[in-house]
Image: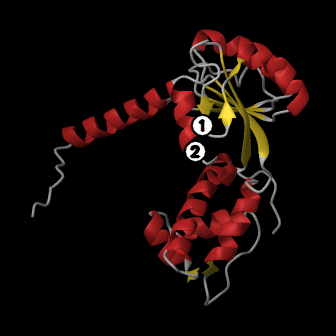
Amino acid sequence: MLKKENVSLSVIRRLPRYHRFLADLMRSGITRISSKELSRRMGLTASQIRQDLNCFGGFGQQGYGYNVEQLHREIGVILGIDKQYPAIVVGAGNIGRAIALNFDFSQMGFEMIGIFDINPSIIGMPIRDLTVADVAGIEAFCQKHHPRIAVLTVSRSAAAEMAEKLIHLGVSGFWNFSHYDFSVKYPGVIVENVHLSDSLMTLCYMVKDLSEKGTSIEVLKD
């Protein structure tokens, strides 16, 4: 496996989808698959799949296709999910708790080592194998445990100050749900901004566009 220079962000964003589909194939007992069949399942072209994977070296064999388990493992290595980067959640409200409870971070390259909040009624609450800690102690915690990643689910008004503090404490990547885009201010830091409202409004536009075109979806009834 040889990673080429300047792999586009669009290719990188497709890698987790490949990884997920390959995991589904493994659970179904499928051991090998052609780019044509994988493209049919994923709604991509076979050419696109080959181009994406060729960014990281050769994986398939002519006349055989892809070994599903091997390709799944190799994409996992490319994504770095074998690294187990230490991560924290800052903000244990509804979104923070839902993320901590429902995401298996270990399957996505992270080890969740702490969760913090400012609310006295939440501090001390058990979440999985962690206990919500007072955010007042986050500096000492970071100096001792050195988290690389922070899941930020605090309010927009608190996000800027908290991000700056965590960056100075060595956090270099953020999964940001705060509605405050701070990636421009800190260009050396990796920020994945998640705006759920943007996604919902995009869906709204697409439904509106479908309706305006007069396209209907036939519902099959028993």
Q: Specify the farthest residue to the top.
A: 157
| Image coordinates for residue 22, horizontal then vertical, percent | 57, 68
In the displayed structure image, the side of residue 217 where residue 94 appears, left or right: right
In the displayed structure image, the side of residue 144 where residue 56 appears, left or right: left
Residue 54 visible in the current orientation: no
Q: Which residue sits at x=67%, y=40%?
A: 129
| Image coordinates for residue 47, horizontal then vertical, percent | 56, 70
Colour basis? secondary structure
- Quadrant for residue 41, please give it: bottom left
Total count of labels:
2
Badge 2 amino acid:
Phe
Above or below 164: residue 61 = below
Q: Which mark is residue 100?
A: 1
Q: For numbered disc 2, what is the local secondary structure? A: loop
Q: Specify the farthest residue to the right.
A: 144
Rendered-image quadrant of the N terminus: bottom right
Above or below 58: residue 98 = above
Q: Which residue is mark 2?
A: 103
Rendered-image quadrant of the C terminus: bottom left
Q: Which residue sits at x=54%, y=22%?
A: 93
Q: Foreground: 192 or 58? A: 192
Using the numbered discs, state the Cα–Cα distance from disc 1 to disc 2 in whole angstroms. 6 Å
Q: For numbered disc 1, what is the local secondary structure? A: helix
In the displayed structure image, the side of residue 159 where residue 24 appears, left or right: left
| Image coordinates for residue 84, horizontal then vertical, percent | 78, 49
Q: Which residue sits at x=62%, y=22%?
A: 91
Q: Foreground: 35 or 168? A: 168
Badge 1 amino acid:
Ala
Q: Are marks 1 and 2 in contact (CB under 8 Å)?
A: yes
| Image coordinates for residue 146, horizontal then vertical, percent | 86, 32
